[in-house]
Amino acid sequence: MLISCPFCGEREVAEFEFRCTLEERGATAAERLYFRLADPRRSLEHWQHVRGCRMWLELHRDLRTGRVLRTASVPVPPADGTGS
Amino acid sequence: MTARFRNPTGGSVDRSRTCRFTFDRQSLRGFAGDTLASALLANGVHLIGRSTKCRRPRGIFTAGPEEPNALGTLDPGDRQIPNVPLTVAPLADGLVFASQNRWPSLRFDLSSIAGVAGARFGAGFYYKTFMWPAWRWYEPLIRGLAGLGCAPKIGVDRPPRERHLDCDVLVVGGGAAGLSAARAAASRGAKVVLCEQDSSLGGELQFETATIDGRASSRWLIDSERELRVAGVELLTGTAVVGCYDDLLLALCQPAGYPGEADELLHIRAAARVLATGATERAIAFAGNDRPGVMLLGAVERFAARFAVRAGNEAVLFANHDRVYCAAQRLREAGIRIAAIVDPRARPELAVLEELERGGVRICNEQVVEQVLGGHRVSGVIVRHRDGVGTPTRISCDVLGASGGWTPALQLATQSGLAQRYDAQLGAFIPVSESATVIPAGAARGKLELAAALADGTAAGAVAATAAGRDAAPAERPALVSADPAPAVMPFWRVVGGDEKRQFVDLQNDVTVSDLRQAVAEGFREIEHVKRYTALGVGTDQGKTSGLPGAAILAEFLGKPLAEVGVSRPRPPTRPIPLGVLAGFRGAPGTVRPVRHTPLQADHVADGALMEPAGLWLRPRYYRDHGESLAAAAEFEAQRVRAAGGLFDASTLGKIEVAGPDAAAFLDRIYLARPSGIGIGRARYCVMLREDGMVLDDGLVLRLAAQHFLLTTSTHAAAAVLSHLEYHAACSAAELAVSCTDVTDAWAVIVVAGPRTRQLLRKVLPPAQWREPLEQLRHMDFHCGKWQSRPLRLLRASFSGELAYELHCAADAAPPLWRALRRHGAPDGVIPYGLEALDILRVEKGYLTSAEINGQVSPYDLRLDDMVKRSAPCIGSGLLARPALHEPSRPILVGLVAADATARLDAGAQLIAAARSTQSLGHVTSAVWSPALGRAVGLALLAREFAAHDREVVAADPLRARYTKARVTAAVHFDPTGERMRL
Ligand SMILES: [Zn+2]
């Protein structure tokens, strides 16, 4: 699998580490942990370019094909502090 | 001397190089260029093995990698290679190999004679039988029969090589289509790699007699290979594609072939791929079609053309297409008498038929082979009308060539994500080309005719080169070809009627027509379910010859069109490969694996330390001079720390600096115990949780300045903790201004522990600067200064229960500081100590390591309730209120003391209420023999409801038959009030 890091370019998956899949924002911690919606067509995940620039990335993946649809750096939440 | 079934001329074997080989203790001869299968057939050996389930005698069925039957064990013995397809493995002088699945011998297999296996393993046998209580009776029997071959006793001594390649165009398959694709792509300037699973290029062209552009096809082949080399195409023969993975990464394997040689694993990334994987001949199901001597028609042809080997002297051919007649002509030229050609179709209009009849070949149109006669070898067939009318006739023969047509090899196309559709003319599925970067070509998409395959390959090569960004160039002139016409195929899958239990569909797994009928009767409807229920196509051959016929017969029983039923999905590996190829590379000698040394590595080695790997680190386990054995040395070192003092290299601890205006607020979210309350110059023991509330790691937090902290982590958790901090800094706490920096390698840590510690430090640290801090530092205070003009932090903290200091110094200053401590400490009996002694000291004091913080414990389980109470809301704290975390069956940290002074405790032992109990109440996490207490002590995680002090439990280690009585105590075994470290 290849992942396109917004900072470093396209790299082998071995340089990255997966952390978690994400659910809709606003859900409680318990919901995020225990009531997951598994939509295989569009999995939103957090990965770190751990053997590269160490930045955290947001990946949209199609789990049926294993293809990375979109990569972005983890967004900075709005300044009003509603992000978490 | 030439073997009995070898023709004096013809073929591509090297008759000047004789190879002696041994098969099941029988000494035989072949030639260089033979496969093991062709060499056996040349000697008239047809009985090769027995089938896995029914133990029926089996022979050679194909001449290629699709072989279901003829698997053998190379070099039988400790290093043997099992399940080698004899139809692929090249012959070498002195080679020894053996048949499989027979006992005591191939000709006389007891289980088949006794009818043990003959009891018939019908469809779903395993599912119906692997159930208690019947399983109790079957198990010993099945265990003896189970498996395909035997694994080697000794692992590979040569690790596989691994290679990464990238190119513009990867062509898979070196037949007519593949060669022309490679040529077309290379002529457009593309960097091309071509791989072919066979040891030589050409595919079907090696066996055909055709002319291409006025040249014999054999000549064209030689010319093409030379042209491709000149054009810089990398040709990988003997290299099979294992599978297609994410982002179209192809894994390929070049198996060693011989024991002791190294396999090679290749990873190839290409801008475009041409899949010229050809087509596989398929079988027909009829009674006795598994007898040795029954093989695919194409196999009989290949053995004759390539190896000059006659698979028999008298053949019956059974096929549903025109090509059988041309094949018959060629086989006659190779010296095989054709007794009859059986064709279920009406008589086709072909000139060659009359020619064959004039030569004495009996042509049986609208007829089928009802039954094969013979035991260890075909002796004849019974032929009857396809509709069962008229009288059956018996025809003698010693080989039967059967062919049900050709199936495009779809494995790679499917794995690459291409769809497929049913082609009625071909009676098979073909891939739908919808991608510019994955391009099936030639027979792999149904272009069976040579001219069509060549033209298709050329076009595919051009498309691939364009997809790879090379210039489009004018189309080449199509080659002028004269060859066999495309075979007209009438789909024909099985002979209707007769004994369906002997009509085999999948030879490797003994799946019969009867099994498929039974599966449908039991309600199975989907091909994938039937595959798993009957084992159709799950063998090492992945049903290459049987998958489509199986699906077609299933479709017939379901009353559905084959197009609707489909074929089962082929998964990687498409060919069996040694597990060592996948597993053996990492960490093998000569491969790149970094080792992390602390700055004191040389000193430890000079002091005779036994260095132990911990992750990538090496750490001293004990010093050999301190005792005759590990236990003796560790005990001596631990005692010396408590009596005088010891030095320990703790440089492998993870060290992370956290700085920024919001550093304190950030750490309050990360840790329990509210680090924002730590004063400057103070340290605190803190614990961090995962999001689910389980303890992630523990360590000290030092406040260097108002906005500057230093964290220490366990050695093994350093990387995970750093990622955890970076993650929350980027995501959940993104509004906080903070930065995290790993400084593990910049600082060495020397622990000085024991009652004589302070006087030692007085000698080593210059008094002008250090006297005052040394006298005034309280537990968990630290002082920053210099030693020999390098930075030094002196922290008073203890992991041993003794008065102790951690000296954090610049990495380059560590060796002189260590030596100074050694020199000045020696007269007082201060010695270096290793991990074993450290473990004794910390278990005596009930301190935690990863043995207790195992990813499954909450802070309550570790009795950190007070710390939780003092905390601000932090990551994971919200989930600590889950009721399940407070149930009486949850484990909690306790101490254990062996009841008997001489008994030992074992880490990992299960805790049970009494000797015969089978219910585990918890387990021993750490155990040591304590010199301070004079008996074995340990730490354990024990269910809360059994964790009352002074309760007696049994530490059970059934594998070693050790049962030790122990008493439950507090986790702190030694100096419970902590007086010693407040000296
Ligand atoms: Zn990066």
Image (tube, helix red, strand yellow):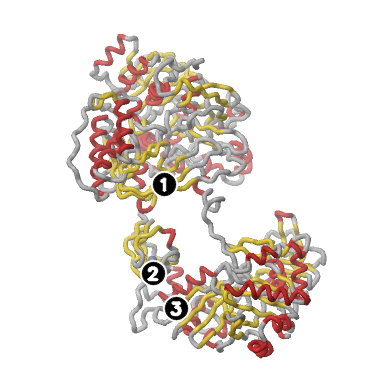
Are both tags, 1 and 3, on one chain? yes
The residue marked by circle 3 belongs to what chain? B
What residue would you read off at disc 3?
B739
> Residue B108 location, x and y as percent?
60, 24
What residue would you read off at disc 2?
A23
Q: Earlier in the sequence, mark 1 or mark 3?
A: 1
Q: In the figure, B783 relative to B56: above or below?
A: below
Tell which of A84 and B234 is nearer to you: B234
For the point 54% across and 51% down, which residue is it?
B590
Q: In the figure, B867 relative to B966: above or below?
A: below
For the point 37% across and 34% down, which residue is it?
B549
The residue marked by circle 2 belongs to what chain? A
Whether residue B319 is visible to the viewer of this picture, yes or no, is yes
Q: Which quadrant of the picture is home to ligand 1?
A: bottom left
| Quadrant assignment for the N terminus of chain A | bottom left
**Residue density around tag 3, few if under 14, some if 14–19, many if 20 or more, within 10 Å:** some
> Residue B916 location, x and y as percent?
74, 58
The disc labelled 1 sits on which kind of residue? Answer: Ala
For the point 62% across and 82% down, which residue is it?
B794
What residue would you read off at disc 1?
B251
Marks 1 and 2 close (CB-CB < 8 Å)? no
Marks 3 and 2 close (CB-CB < 8 Å)? no
